Image (cartoon, grey):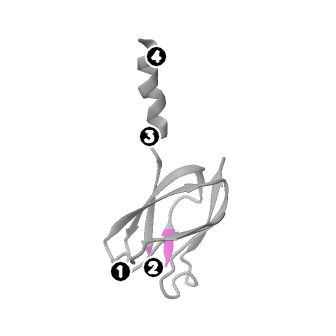
Amino acid sequence: TPTEVATPAAATPAAAANVVDVSLTEFTIDMPASIPAGEVTFVVSDDGTVEHNFEVEGQGIEEEFPENLQPGETNELTLTLEPGTYVVYCPVGNHREQGMEIELTVTE
């Protein structure tokens, strides 16, 4: 019986992927600058007045949404991130140059 009780409890942390809320506005990416390694789901909202996108680049990964987010839209991007440094930015137009870029540190 103790084994049965322990099994669901042990499975819970693994099943709950790290969820990171991201807010995109003109011209800022509001999200944590450091997250733990492993599977992470970025819940990205365009809280601005123009379209934006969300790109994660580093450690051999380069992922973004296939379509830009329109104002008020939310989308999710799930990645498995290794420890290291990544660049997160908006690939729309010159938004990156206007400040929509942050360095993301993924810790052990």
Q: Give the answer, above or below, for where 11 lies relative to 102.
A: above
Q: Amino acid at mark 2?
A: Glu
Image position, residue 6 (x, y; %): 46, 21
Classify residue 58 as left or right of residue 46: right
- Which residue: 55% across, 74% down? 89
Instruction: State which quadrant residue 72 falls in.
Output: bottom left
Q: Give the answer, above or below, for where 61 lies relative to 19.
A: below
Q: Are marks 2 and 1 in contact (CB under 8 Å)?
A: yes
* Mark 2 vs 1, N-terminal side: 2
Image position, residue 5 (x, y; %): 41, 19
> Would you name the residue on which mark 2 appears?
26
Q: Are marks 2 and 3 in contact (CB under 8 Å)?
A: no
* Mark 4 vs 3, N-terminal side: 4
* Mark 1 vs 4, N-terminal side: 4
Which residue range is magenta in the image? 25-29
Give the CA separation, mark 2 to mark 3: 34 Å
- Which residue: 50% across, 53% down? 40
Secondary element under disc 2, as helix, strand or loop, is loop
**Mark number, residue 15:** 3
Q: Amino acid at mark 4?
A: Thr
Give the CA separation, mark 2 to mark 1: 8 Å
* Mark 3 vs 1, N-terminal side: 3
Image position, residue 4 (x, y; %): 41, 18
Secondary element under disc 3, as helix, strand or loop, is helix
> Which of these two is toward me, 16 or 72?
16
**Mark number, residue 3:** 4
Q: Residue furthest right?
A: 84
**Mark number, residue 19:** none
